């Protein structure tokens, strides 16, 4: 059984025309995995568990609200705002296949873990701050509640490299300038496995 903690850099793929990322977008993840070896040497296993992720995306897609309607626009004047981001808090269920060079005597070993991660959106928050004021929107119904993605991690001992590719979009129904907002999340970073 293992605890894991990760720090990742978030990028957005499939951006509509004019949309770009601003500043650095970071995310953190943490959770618990149950390791279930499937061979005699116990160096091949499957694992599943439960975790949480907090992801930030800094970009120039402005999310605003008029009454109960959510609106989307592209802010091409980066100097016109000081903050424009959305944040998502997710509960995650990873399911992974594991290979490692471990032995019964050593806890330091090479590893390659890969699999699929299912996520459910618990909370979202969009913030736009400009000279004329600040807008905060929570619980945007245009976000996908369920997300799914593939991931791979590998390295030696505690510190490992990590990559994730989202298979479905972050938004289910958002449009800007007649284009569907089809953001897919791609994350790269490091993950720490703690026995």
Image: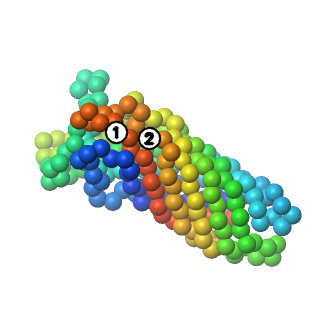
What is the secondary structure assignment of the residue under circle 2? loop
Chain-order first, disc 1 or disc 2 = 2
The residue tagged 1 is 181
Is 184 on the left or on the right of 135, as rendered? right
Is 103 on the left or on the right of 154, as rendered? right
Q: Which of the 4 image quarters holds residue 67?
A: top left
Residues at marks 1 and 2, CA–CA distance in whole angstroms: 8 Å
Q: Residues within 10 Å of mark 2 (few under 14, many from 20)?
A: many
Residue 61 drawn at (x, y percent): 27, 43
Residue 66 drawn at (x, y percent): 23, 26
Is 143 on the left or on the right of 4, as rendered? left
Q: Which of the 4 image quarters holds residue 128?
A: top left
- Quadrant position of the C terminus in the picture: bottom right
The residue tagged 2 is 169
Q: Which residue of the protein is positioned furthest toward the top in this rendering?
A: 67
Residue 113 drawn at (x, y percent): 64, 61
- Quadrant position of the N terminus in the picture: bottom right
Q: Relative to 77, is 192 above or below?
A: below
Q: Which of the 4 image quarters holds residue 73?
A: top left
Q: Residue at x 76, y 62 (%)?
A: 44
Q: Residue at x 79, y 73 (%)?
A: 103
Query: Is residue 189 in sight in this rendering?
Result: yes
What is the secondary structure assignment of the residue under circle 1? loop
Q: Nearer the viewer, residue 16 or 90?
A: 16
Q: Relative to 16, is 44 above or below?
A: below
Q: How many marks?
A: 2
Labelled pair 1, 2 in contact (Cβ < 8 Å): yes
Query: Is residue 91 in sight in this rendering?
Result: no
């Amino acid at each position: 059984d293992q605890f894991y903690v990760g720090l990742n850099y978030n990028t957005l793929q499939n951006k509509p025309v004019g949309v770009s990322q601003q500043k650095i977008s970071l995310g953190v993840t943490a959770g618990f995995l149950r390791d279930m070896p499937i061979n005699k040497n116990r160096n091949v296993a499957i694992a599943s568990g439960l975790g949480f992720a907090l992801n930030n995306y800094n970009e120039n897609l402005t999310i605003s609200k008029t009454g109960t309607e959510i609106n989307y626009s592209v802010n091409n004047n980066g100097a016109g705002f000081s903050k424009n981001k959305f944040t998502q808090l997710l509960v995650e269920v990873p399911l992974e296949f594991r290979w490692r060079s471990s032995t019964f005597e050593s806890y330091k070993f090479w590893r390659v873990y890969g699999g699929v991660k299912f996520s459910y959106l618990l909370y979202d928050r969009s913030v736009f701050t400009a000279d004329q004021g600040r807008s905060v929107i929570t619980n945007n119904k245009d976000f996908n509640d369920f997300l799914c993605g593939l991931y791979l991690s590998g390295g030696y001992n505690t510190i490992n490299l990590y990559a994730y590719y989202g298979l479905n979009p972050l938004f289910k129904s958002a449009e800007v300038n007649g284009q569907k907002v089809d953001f897919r999340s791609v994350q790269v970073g490091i993950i720490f496995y703690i026995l």
